[in-house]
């Protein structure tokens, strides 16, 4: 198979589905998840105070916060801020991540890596203070 290189600017930025988020969240997919790819990679930008609904992933995944400050929480755990941090979410564990409210470093931008295939079950709002 021939290597295919694309500039990041050539990839479209899309609004994330409103049904799964509170506030504006945009994504830019970097891998198509085609037959050859074993994982999907996307950059995600949460506008100020935007949150994901709580969700559980059927497959493990990881994200790395590149800029700004985000928040995350495993459902039984404590809500915590994260900046320039790498995190993993195990398969089947209910969790949530989103923007830290009114933070001077701006909204979070992170890279998400997950195994290909539909893997997320969306649940209820996070209840972590901004929804």
Image: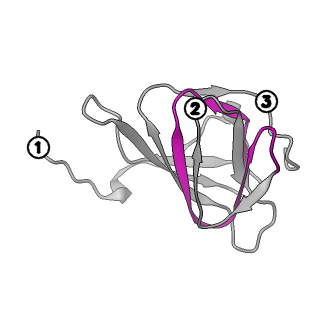
Residue 123 in sight in this render: yes
Q: Residue at x 69, y 47 (%)?
A: 97
Magenta span main SS: strand
Is residue 74 inside the magenta stretch? yes
Magenta-colored stretch includes residue 62: yes
Mark in front: 1 vs 2: 2
Residue furthest to the bottom = 104
Closer to the eye: label 3 or 2: 2
**Horizontal arrangement in the rendering, residue 73 relative to residue 29 (left or right):** right
Residue 23 appearing in the image: no
- Residue 17, percent from left and from top: 62, 34
Per the image, the residue denoted by label 3 is: 124
Q: Which residues are magenta?
A: 51-78
Q: Secondary structure at mark 3?
A: loop
Instruction: Provide the residue designation for mark 1.
Output: 2
Label 1 SS: loop
Work out how far the residue at label 1 is from the one at label 2, CA to CA, in angstroms: 33 Å
* Labels 1 and 2: the sequence-earlier one: 1
Q: Residues within 10 Å of mark 2 (few under 14, many from 20)?
A: some
10 Å neighbourhood of mark 3: few (<14), some, or many (≥20)?
few
x 42%, y 46%: residue: 41
Q: Quadrant of the C terminus?
A: top right
Label number found at residue 91: 2
Vertical placement of residue 118 versus 45, above or below: above
101 on left or right of 98:
right
What is the CA distance from the residue labelled 3 to the residue labelled 2? Answer: 18 Å
In this view, 44 is above or below 54: below
Q: Residue at x 47, y 39 (%)?
A: 114
């Amino acid at each position: 198979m021939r290597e295919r290189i694309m500039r990041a600017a050539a990839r479209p930025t899309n609004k994330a589905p409103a049904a799964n988020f509170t506030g504006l969240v945009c994504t830019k997919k970097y891998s198509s998840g085609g037959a050859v790819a074993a994982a999907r990679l996307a950059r995600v930008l949460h506008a100020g105070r935007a949150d994901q609904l709580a969700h559980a992933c059927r497959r493990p995944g990881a994200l790395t916060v590149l800029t700004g400050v985000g928040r995350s929480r495993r459902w039984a755990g404590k809500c915590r801020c994260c900046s320039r941090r790498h995190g993993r979410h195990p398969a089947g564990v209910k969790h949530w991540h989103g923007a830290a409210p009114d933070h001077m470093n701006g909204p979070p931008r992170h890279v998400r890596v997950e195994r290909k295939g539909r893997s997320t079950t969306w649940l209820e709002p996070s209840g972590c203070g901004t929804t």
